[in-house]
């Protein structure tokens, strides 16, 4: 079955540091890949997505590239802010129909001033 | 921007009681889902729903759970006899007509606490 593996947290960074959160996946078909973010006490928000190999998703300074050869979708940001503190979930969805989203375990990011 | 809404935001119930969690999906969406997240754990799929019937359900979604779309706007999750381990955040999601690449949009969640 499908699965998503992401680096364990928590990750603690100083403001303006470079962020990488690793994510790899296993899927039987050709999934779409997503990063969702969950701010403290809130629900899941779509951060970015990529639907095919070599696509780059980007939003709010975050970006991730769909790498089929390494089955990876690492999240990066060049300069994090305190407001980026949240839990980040890597996820995939097989193409077609009603397919469910499969989530990774989440990585908690804490940015300190 | 349209969004998925859920009510209530928090619910506390006694073990063995029935609860109904409500969701209003985005209006032109046709696929509906429930997921749950036990505190500190990953988000898990429960059930998907399309054309007034369940499309897929996980092993978590046993006979204690049911879903319904009672009218044109609401989508509900019912837990008939709650257990302590049902305590979790429950997320509703919806998606437009699938062409393969559509995104699921999640609501803010209902935090259920079973005592």
Image: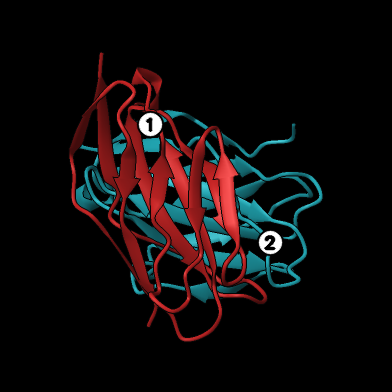
Chain colours: A red, B cyan
- The residue at the point 30 percent across, 54 percent down is B42
Mark 1 vs mark 2: which is more N-terminal?
1
Please, which residue is most extreme toward the top here? A113
The quadrant in which residue A56 appears is bottom right
Chain for disc number 2? B
Residue A62 visible to an observer of this rendering? yes
Question: Which residue is label 1 attached to?
Answer: B11
Q: Nearer the viewer, residue A111 or B40?
A: A111
Q: Residue B59 placed where, x, y %?
A: 35, 74
Checking the image for residue B47, the label placed there is none
Q: Secondary structure at mark 1?
A: strand
In this picture, residue A106 sits left or right of residue A94 = left
In the rendered image, residue B52, in percent from the top left (x then y), is placed at 71, 67
Q: Are marks 1 and 2 in contact (CB under 8 Å)?
A: no
**Tag 2's secondary structure?**
loop
Where is residue B31 shown, x and y percent of the image? 68, 62
């Amino acid at each position: 079955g499908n699965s998503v593996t992401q680096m364990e947290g928590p990750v603690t960074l100083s403001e303006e540091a470079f962020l990488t959160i690793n994510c790899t996946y296993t899927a039987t078909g050709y999934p779409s890949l997503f990063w969702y973010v969950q701010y403290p006490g809130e629900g899941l928000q779509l951060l970015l997505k990529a639907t095919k190999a070599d696509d780059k998703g980007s939003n709010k300074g975050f970006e991730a590239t769909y790498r089929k050869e390494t089955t990876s979708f690492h999240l990066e940001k060049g300069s994090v802010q305190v407001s980026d503190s949240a839990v980040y979930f890597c996820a995939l969805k097989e193409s077609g129909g009603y397919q469910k989203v499969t989530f990774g375990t989440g990585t908690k990011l804490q940015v300190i001033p | 921007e349209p969004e998925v809404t859920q009510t209530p935001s928090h619910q506390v119930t006694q073990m063995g009681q029935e609860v109904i969690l409500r969701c209003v999906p985005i209006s032109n969406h046709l696929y509906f889902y429930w997921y749950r997240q036990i505190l500190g754990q990953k988000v898990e799929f429960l059930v998907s729903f399309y054309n007034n019937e369940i499309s897929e359900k996980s092993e978590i979604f046993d006979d204690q759970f049911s879903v319904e779309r009672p009218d044109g706007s609401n989508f509900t999750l019912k837990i008939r006899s709650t257990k302590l381990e049902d305590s979790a955040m429950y997320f509703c999601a919806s998606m437009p007509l699938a062409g393969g690449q559509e995104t699921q949009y999640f609501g803010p969640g209902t935090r259920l606490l079973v005592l």
